[in-house]
Every structure is written in C-alpha cells, then in structure tokens.
Image (tube, coloured by chain):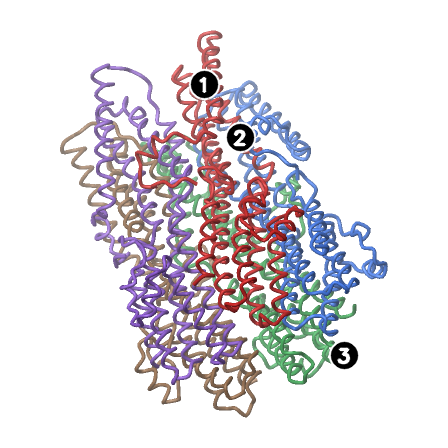
Chain colours: A green, B brown, C purple, D red, E blue
Amino acid sequence: MIKYNPKNWFGLIFHSYSRQVVRTLFPFLTIMAIYTAAVTFLIEDYFELEFNSTTVVHSLLGIVLGLFLVFRVNSAYDRWYEGRKLWGLLLNNSRNLASKLNAMLSLENKEDRSFFEEMIPAFAFALKDHLRKGAKIKHLKIKDKSIVKYLENKEHIPNAITGLIYKRLNQLLKDGNLTPNQFLVLDKEMKEFSDILGGCERIKNTPIPYSYSMFIKKFVFTYTITLPLAFITEFHYITIPIVIFIFFILVSVELIAEEIEEPFGGDVNDLPTQELSEKIEKNVKELFNS
Amino acid sequence: MIKYNPKNWFGLIFHSYSRQVVRTLFPFLTIMAIYTAAVTFLIEDYFELEFNSTTVVHSLLGIVLGLFLVFRVNSAYDRWYEGRKLWGLLLNNSRNLASKLNAMLSLENKEDRSFFEEMIPAFAFALKDHLRKGAKIKHLKIKDKSIVKYLENKEHIPNAITGLIYKRLNQLLKDGNLTPNQFLVLDKEMKEFSDILGGCERIKNTPIPYSYSMFIKKFVFTYTITLPLAFITEFHYITIPIVIFIFFILVSVELIAEEIEEPFGGDVNDLPTQELSEKIEKNVKELFNS
Amino acid sequence: MIKYNPKNWFGLIFHSYSRQVVRTLFPFLTIMAIYTAAVTFLIEDYFELEFNSTTVVHSLLGIVLGLFLVFRVNSAYDRWYEGRKLWGLLLNNSRNLASKLNAMLSLENKEDRSFFEEMIPAFAFALKDHLRKGAKIKHLKIKDKSIVKYLENKEHIPNAITGLIYKRLNQLLKDGNLTPNQFLVLDKEMKEFSDILGGCERIKNTPIPYSYSMFIKKFVFTYTITLPLAFITEFHYITIPIVIFIFFILVSVELIAEEIEEPFGGDVNDLPTQELSEKIEKNVKELFNS
Amino acid sequence: MIKYNPKNWFGLIFHSYSRQVVRTLFPFLTIMAIYTAAVTFLIEDYFELEFNSTTVVHSLLGIVLGLFLVFRVNSAYDRWYEGRKLWGLLLNNSRNLASKLNAMLSLENKEDRSFFEEMIPAFAFALKDHLRKGAKIKHLKIKDKSIVKYLENKEHIPNAITGLIYKRLNQLLKDGNLTPNQFLVLDKEMKEFSDILGGCERIKNTPIPYSYSMFIKKFVFTYTITLPLAFITEFHYITIPIVIFIFFILVSVELIAEEIEEPFGGDVNDLPTQELSEKIEKNVKELFNS
Amino acid sequence: MIKYNPKNWFGLIFHSYSRQVVRTLFPFLTIMAIYTAAVTFLIEDYFELEFNSTTVVHSLLGIVLGLFLVFRVNSAYDRWYEGRKLWGLLLNNSRNLASKLNAMLSLENKEDRSFFEEMIPAFAFALKDHLRKGAKIKHLKIKDKSIVKYLENKEHIPNAITGLIYKRLNQLLKDGNLTPNQFLVLDKEMKEFSDILGGCERIKNTPIPYSYSMFIKKFVFTYTITLPLAFITEFHYITIPIVIFIFFILVSVELIAEEIEEPFGGDVNDLPTQELSEKIEKNVKELFNS
C-alpha cells in the first residue's frame, strides 16, 4: 500500500494509473477506438446508411449497468475492508496474547517467554506470505532450529505455528504453570487467531461467483459495442471520443473492483500486511521486555 | 465451482453461458422475437395503425425495475456469500476441534483419536451431500462398522454424527479423560458445528418470498410485453433487436440471481463443498498425526 | 408458506395474485381508471382545455419514489429474513438442548427426560400460536395435567414454558443431577430461547414508523393522481391504460412489502412455522430415543 | 407511538400530518409559493425576459439529491430500529434476570426478592425518562425510602440503579446466597443492561454529522430556489404548483428523517417506551410471584 | 464537534461552511469559472465553431457518478458512526470496570482503588490524544510519579496503560484479592478496551483504497472539464453558472466525505472525544466514591 494524502486533489487527479491498470486498459481503449472509427466510416461514408438512432436504450440500460458497477465496487470494497479488519484484529490479538503471557509467565521462565516472543510475530509473517505466494520459513526469523526443521516439513505453515503454540499452552497447563482459568482465557485468544486465518483464506480463495463476473463483463462489452449506433447519426466522427470516454469510465470501475477485491498482494491498493507484521513484531518485543 | 481468472476479460466475454442458462434463455428469446415481429407486422403493415409512442413510461419504470433486479442479485449474492462463510467456518472449526482434541487426548488413546479423525471429516462430507440430494453413508469413508450400521437407520445423517461426537465427549468427561474446563471448550466448538448445519439448511430451504419472486417475474414480463409499443412508431422493424437486447439483459439478471442463491449444488457457480470437504479430511489427518 | 419452484417462470407469471392482494388492488385500480377517464373526458372533450403537459416532473419524482419503494420492500424482506433466521435458530437450539439433555440425563431418569421431550416442542408450538392469534394450550400436546392446569392460568404461555424449564434445570442442579458446568452450558441455550421469543415479538409488534408509512402512501397517491395531467395532451384516451399500468406497479410494491413484513401469519408468504414446529417435535423425539 | 393499521390505505392517505410537521412545513411552502410567483411575475411580465430554460440540470442533480434523501431516511430508520431493538432487549433481559433470580433466591428471602422486583422495572422507567427530559424519582414507584433518598442525590439515575443492583448481587455472592457460577450468569445479564443504556444514550446524543446535515439542507434549498428557472419559459404560472409539489416532497423526506431519528420522545413516531416499561413491570411481577 | 439543532433549517442553510471546506472549495470554483468562461469565449466568439452538443452523455454518466458519491459519503458516515460506537463502548466499559472494581475491592484497599480511579480515565484521555497528534502524558492527570516516569519511556501510551492495568489485576489475583471468577469477568472488560483501541487505530490509519479515491477524483474532474461542451451550443454564457453549480455540488460531496471519514480530529464534524473523556473521568470518580 502506498501512503497518500486523500485530500491532495491535484496530485490524485494527475497521478497516472498503476502500471497494471494501464497495461489492461490501453489495448482495450485502442481496440475500441479502431472499432468505433471503422463502424462510423462504414456507415457514414461507405454504405451511407441512413437510420434513426436513439440514445434511449443505452440511457435505460446505462442505469442498470451503473447500479451493477457501483454495487460491484462496493462489494469489492467490503471485502477489502473485511481483510483490513482481520489484520487489525491480528495486531490486537497478538498484543493481547503477548501482554497476557507476559503477565502470566514468571520472569524466570525464559525459555517459554522467548518461544512466544518468536512465534507470535512468526504467525503474522507466515500469514502474510501464505496469502501471497506461500510462506517461506526463512522470512519468519525463528532462531530455534528444531522448530525451523519441524516447520520445513509442513505444507500449511500458519496452521503449523498455531498448532505449536497450542501444544505449548497445553504443556504449560499440564505442568501447572497455567491455571485452568488462565488456560481458558488464552484458548479464546488462540481461537481468534484461527478465525483470522480462516477469514483471510476465505477472502483470498473466493472470487465473486462465475456467472456474476461473466455477466458484468458481457454487459459492459455488448453495451459499448452497440454504443456507436446510438450516437452516429447525430455526432458522426465525434462519436469516437464519446464512446471512448464512456467505455473508459465503465471499464475503469470494473478494473478497480478487481484490484481492490484481492487485498493481500503487494499492489498499491493492497493492505500494508508487511508493515503490520513488523508492527506486531515490535509491539510483542516491547511487551515481553517491559 | 469452476476455477477461473477474473481478470481474463476476453475469455469471460466470449465464454458461452452455462448450459442451464442457455436452456432457459433460448426459448424465451425466441418467443420474444416472434412476438415482437408479429406485433410490428400487425401494427405497421396489416392494420397500418398510427399512434404516438413514447419511451417515457418504460424509462420511468425501467429505473424501478433496474433497482429491483440489482437488489435481487445482491440479496442472492449475500446468501451465496453467507454459505461460503459457513463452509469457511466449518473448515476452521474442524481444524480447531482436531487440533484441540489432538492436544487433549493422550497419544495412547488410539481408539478415541481414530474415532474423531474419522468423524470430523465425515460430518463435512455428510453435510455436503445432505445439502445436495441427501447424505449417502458410503461416501463418508467410515471404517467402524457399528457406526455405519447406526447411521444407516438415521434420516438426518449430519445430526446423527454430531450426536455421536457429543456422546463420546460426554463419555470422555465422565471417564475423567477430559477436565470440565476442556469439556466446556469443546462444547463451544460443537455448538458451532450445529450452527453451521442450521445456517446451511436455512439457506437451502428458504427461497425468497413467493410474492416477491412472482412480482419480479410478472414485472419483467409485462415490461417487455409492452416494450414494442414504445419503439414501434419510430424504429419499425429495428424494434425487434432492441426488444431482444433489453429482454436479454433483464432476464439474464434474474437467472443469475436464481443460480447464485442456491450455493450448495454442483453447478459452476456453486461453492466448492467437495473440495472443502477433502481439505478438511486432509487437514484433520495431518493434525492428528503431527 | 406455499412451496413453489422459483425457476418455473411461466407458472409464476400467469399465477394469479393471492386473494388478499386482489381484494386490495382491484377497487384501487377501478377507482383509478374511472378517475383518469373522467379527468381525460373533462379536459379533452368538455372544457377542451389546452396546455403544455410534461413528463419531466414525474420522471424526476419517479426516481425518488422508486428508490423509496425498493428500500421499503428490502427492509420488509430483511424483517422477513430475520424472522426466518430466528426460527432457524429455534430449530437448532431445540435440537442442541435435546441432544445435550439426552447426553447429560441418565437413562433411568424417565420423568425428567419425558418432561423435556414434551416441553421443548411445546415451546415452538406455543410461540407459533402466540405470534398468530394467541397460544392455545390444547395445541401443545402436553400430557402432564398439572402442567396443563398451571399454563391455563398464564397469559404469556411461551414465557411460562421457559420459566418451567428454567425451574426444572435449577432443581436438577440442586439435586446434583447436573454439574455447575453443565448448568452453565444449558443456561446459555435457555438464554437463546428467550432471545428468539423477544426477537419474534419485536418483529410482530413493530410496524415501520407511522410517518414513514403515511408518507409513502401519500406520495404514491399524489403521484398517481397528478399522473394523467402529464400524459393527457399527447396521449388522450391512451392515458388511461398508461396510468393504470404505472399505478399497478407502484401499489403492488407497497402491498408486497406489507405482506412480507409480517412473516408469522398463515399467508402464502409467511414462514412455515407450523412445519418447523412439527420438525422440532420429530427431531426432539428422535434425539431422546437414540 | 400511536397504533395504526398499516394496511388502511385511505385512512393513511387522508390523515393529516402530525402538528410538528405542519408547523414546520406550512411556512416553508408559503414562502416558496410567494417566491416562485414573484420570480415568475418579474421574468414573464415585468422584465419580459426571454431565455432558454432546461430541466436537464435539475434532472441530473435530482437523482443525486434523491439518493441522498433516501439514504438519509434509511439511516434515520436504522437508528430508530436500533432503538427498538435495544428496548426489545431490555424487555427480554428484565424477564431473564427476574426469572433467574426467582429460581436462584429462596422463597423465604423476601427482602431481596422484593428489592429486585422493584428495581428491575425501576431501571426501565428511569431509562425512559432519562432519554426524554431526565429521570424523575417519583415515577419509579420505589417504596423503600432509603433507596429513594440515595437516588435523589444522584445525577445519572439509571446508572445509579444498576450500581445498586450490582452491589446487591456482590453482597449475595459474599453471603453465599449465590454460587460463583450463578454470579457469573447474572453478571452477564447486568452487562447487557449497561450496554442497552449506553446504546440508547449514543442514539440520543449523536445527531448526523454537522456537515452532512448542513449539506443536505443547503442542497434542497439551492435546488428548489433555482427550480423556477427550469420551468418558467415553458409553463409560465403553472410553474408555481410544480415547484411547490417538488419542494413539498423533498422537504417532507428530510422532516420525516428528523422525526424518526430521535426515537425516544413522546411523538407519534416514537417508540412505545412507556408501554414497554409497563410491560416489564407487569412481567417481572408475574415472574416473581409464580 | 459543535452542538447544533438539526431542526433549525434557516440557520443551517445560511450558515457558512467550515473554513477548511471554503479553503479547498474556493480556488476550485474560481479555476472552474475561468476555465468555463475561456472555453465558451473560444468556441463562441473566437473560433465561432458550430457543433451539435448533447447532455445525454453527462446525464448517463451523471447517474453513475452520483451513485459513487452517495456510496462514498455513506461509507464515510459508516466509519464515523463506527468511531462513535467505539467511544460509546469506551464510556460504557469504563463505567462497568469502575463499578465492578468498586464492588470487588474492599473499601480499605485505598491504593488499588485510587490506582484504578486514575488509570481508567487516563486511558480515555491517552486514546483521545493518541488518535490526534500523539498522547501527551501531562494531559493524563496522573499523580503517581513512578507511573508517569514509566509511561514517559513508552511510545504507545494507551497500550502501556492497559498493560499496567492488566499487571495490577494479575497481582490482585495472585494476592487473593480477586477470585478466579472475578478475574475472568474483569479480563473480559480489559479485552474490550484493547478492541476499542484497535478499532480506533484501524479507522484512523486506513483511508479508502488508493485507486478508489483516485478514480472518484479523476471522474469528477473529467466529468466537469467536459461539461461546458454539453451546454455551450444551447446556453452560451449561461453555461458558466450551470457548470459552477454542478461542480459545486459534486465537489462538496467528496469534501464532506473526506471530512467525515476522519472522526477523531478537532473539527466541527469530529466526535466529541474530549467531552466523552471528561464524562468518563466524572463518572468513574462518582462510581468509586459512592
């Protein structure tokens, strides 16, 4: 995620789009321009057809299409915001868990303290990578080699980490280092870690339904492909910029929705999962050493 | 659910609709084309009627209809997404339950461990089939023959499985293999299994209210049946493609809503319940053997 | 609630409306037709007035009105769906409570077992009737005469039933038949019964705010009463079907909203509370005898 | 809140508005009529200006304004419904607390029983008045004079009542009249009382943001003030009723939103907090004496 | 937040905008006026171009733009209201925690009582400043110098305060001044403090996605920049006020959304966090001394 000032109007208006959008948008606009020019030429100058054209059909359907696109963007935004909430929860829960363990574990118990100090941020880093291209163990900054070895054989690293934490908590309960009530409190925190993991996986793995996505694209396509016919008799070659303009707006909306609804990548719109992971690391360290 | 790349515009635009949609849509479009042609012929060439036609009425009502259809699709989408959330929860809860039982049950207690290793995924498979055409016991991969026999006499298989798990947990509590606090923790997990079952059944068994569904269909019908009258005096035979185009968009929306709002079938839009069940099976096995 | 196939387009389009809707709608449409005819006759043929008419005002306000009606229907639908969720919860909770009590109570304790086997479905039947015309004790199928007598003196039957269950649970706790932890688990279930009762009563007793309801009706009324003036100069007597058509759509929406927002009656749109109660009865019986 | 039959169309259409609305609306409409007449007279007959007028600008902005007003009413309605939910919860929680205390306290302990029988409804009455013009102790029907005296010195009566109840519960726990588990159950109920209080105070004390409210009013004002210019060249003096009609609809919506979003007063649209408080009183009495 | 009467129409209509809005809006409007005048002059009087202009394109896209802006404002409002809810929760939780500690701690334990009496409001004041320009310890009114010193070395003051409270609670549990059950109850309250902190930080640190924000600004810009072309041929120099009017409305909406979505500052629209903090201080003091 890039930092920006949402109140800087001039900056935002003249800032060029992200490379990804340009790469998708540019060929589309070119094809559309050529197509519109060809249609106009054929009708106006080659066949010299004459017919009544009307903008009524496109006005009417334009409202329906507009509604679809707005809802589309908003459902993408909801998804993005849900992702943000989950990572906010992760930050909170990591702090809570660290703060509780810090209060519950005796200062002498250095082994367990350093175990949790390493594993809580490791979960965040593992989750971040897991939601991108797969977790890499060398990014997790774990010093304990037996744990590194254990994790290397696992497919689902974040799951394996919560498993390790859960086992350690049970051991502490059995050894009497945690009272049953303290265990209950910590169990609740662990449950939320697992819910956050599940929620993030759900957002990542569930695109909008196939028919819905296909329908919006087909609708935008048939809408713009027939658009020249609505303007040609009255505007002649000025039809070309008009069609390009409308097409540009409609496709942009869909592209933005596509970018926003996958909030865990490394794009400009994506959530600052790297920064949040580092914040978790810093906070947890501070909490265990206070 | 088929896997697709939501950013592949060309693929999605030219991909043909699912067979179900075509089967419903095609006769509708044909009938509509014949009807419009007939109306146009009768008015233009047979009776040679002359009257003022206006698109104002259809513009006005078109917005209302558009709003209805968009909300319709979105409420269907909410339902679909709720189903997805429930199955995400199921995956999470199955993992949690397995991970907790793995930590709580001693390694020697092989009987109970293998019981839960079998029954947790069995619940997912049973639920999946229960939401389609009814659970089949042979799909559940249960090796214990007494359990298979017990389940064969039951009507509601997922319910019977949670009943079995619940009984076993109570037995473990009575035998002192679980502490009261551990039992409380597991009871909470079991409650969520039952909530997931209830939520899925609700989604499956509750279509939108009868009047609402009927009204939208009647509205689309009367709207398109009167549409030729709005265009005929100005567009003559070009009315036919215009009416077909508008009709196609309107009916498509309703059809997509219908497809999406039943998310538990085996359609292209349906949730990947089969894959999720298999993932549960794999994860639970990994957790019990780590 | 009648069962219907939401994908049966032809059936739904030509199915006539429910009697209630027809009874309300028909006189309205008749009056509107007479009124429009009278206005048209007076202006066109009697006074032979000439004036500029415009559809702009009605187009503009039509969008606002359309938005209102759509939101109106959707808030009614939300209410309906909340009612459905509450009854889904009731089914689930009844199952959970039965399944837990079945595991907790010893098989010899036939008295308590049969008490709960009777009272859990009795709550559902009592709630169903309470939300219609008031609970009738003879519908509850309670065999224990002392309970029947006790309930006969009560005004609020569902409340009295939860009171009875709650008392019995406390007795079981005092007698040592339930451990404190088990009591806590059952207490949570009972709380949800009471929340379901409260939620259903809220839905039943709270119509939309008076001003809001009045405003929508006044808006529809003034809108349609002035509608003939917008069409008359251009369409003459064709104004009559146009006005009827628009009026029909607008009033239908409001009528559907009214029907849907009271989901506990015996109408075609109402929730299948009778069936759900019977399902609860059947499931509870199965659970206690397994 | 007045009781009304939402299906009584004729009654609702011809029922006059509440006095408050009329008092606000009438001078607005008068001023608007004079203003429009003056503008029309000046342009048409005095200066005899001639210019192109268009309804396009107002059509375009009308949709934006319509969307704002509809969302405005709906967010007001959400607030109203949230208030209703909170009072529904209060009714439920009062019942639950009474029913639980009735089961937990021995029948001999008349002092504590009558304390709770008095204080639970007193909370509802105090909250009702607190949300209107401030709680009055004489409305609370408390017989115990020491409590009356104690409350008289308090500024925040509902808070003081929950404080008293909480203290009594702690005393009962210390005296061994409540087990720790029972205390936990009752503590949860008390937490909800305090959440209800907080929620109601939030709804009462938070109007919509200043800029938002100001913007909508400025928008309605500039919109209607420029409206005559859009109609004048084509409709001359008929502009007056047109402008009044549109203005009436727009201002009504805002007025309804203002009325609905403060749900705790004594208006026709306000919640039946007096009746609900009396219902709580009656129910609690019945529960303690059964 | 300034107090205002939302029903004072005249006051609100003629109240000038906040300085911030004017500072942003005024140069925009000036530039737009100059631009439109220049375009009109060049086309009408300099080049004397003649072409067909149409408002259809801007009508069509205007609806899409309107929808975007309305949703934009509403998502900003949701954020604002979520912030309000969180601070309402903070008030409630502070009261609850104080009321519970008051009941649980013996009257003799003056040290702990005064500790919590100081620290609970200190959290609110620290959070308030933390969400503005960073917490300042001198604003917290803490008398205990060792705590002041401890906090001075911390970066994240609200976090450090909850850490201190949590440690003290654990100490009280270890010393037997709190029973395990009481600790569990207080732990739940503390968890909510941390959730409130996390929620407020999330709202503060998460602007809407970059692409979305950029797109809306680009859309408003291209829309208004092309607007003169739509009106020029018919309205000549009257195009200038028309364009300014539409531009003013569109930009206002975006500016309001920007103001509302950051609810923790000291602006007129911002939440009364200062007042709420003082209320917490007053309430907590009253509760500990009753």
* Chain where mark 2 sits: D
Q: Amino acid at mark 1?
A: Ala
- Residue occupied by mark 3: A110
Residue A53: where, in percent of width, then height? 34, 33
Check the image and name the residue furthest to the left: B46
Viewer-closest of E140 and B147: E140
- Do discs 3 and 1 belong to a common subunit? no
* Chain where mark 3 sits: A
Q: Amino acid at mark 3?
A: Lys
Would you say residue A34 is visible in this rendering?
yes
Marks 2 & 3, CB-CB < 8 Å contact: no
Quadrant of the rendered structure where residue A227 is?
top left
Viewer-closest of B139 and A229: B139
Please state if E67 lies on the left or on the right of C124 as rendered. Answer: right
Viewer-closest of A230 and E137: E137
Quadrant of the rendered structure where residue A209 is?
bottom left
Question: Mark 2 Cα within 10 Å, few/some/many (few <14, many 20+)?
Answer: some
What element does badge 1 sit on?
helix
**Distance CA(mark 3)–CA(mark 1):** 82 Å
**Distance CA(mark 2)–CA(mark 3):** 65 Å
Check the image and name the residue furthest to the top: D46
Question: Mark 1 Cα within 10 Å, few/some/many (few <14, many 20+)?
Answer: some
- Residue occupied by mark 1: D33
What element does badge 3 sit on?
helix
Q: Quadrant of the N terminus of chain D?
A: top left
Viewer-closest of C139 and B174: C139
Q: Which mark is residue D219?
A: 2
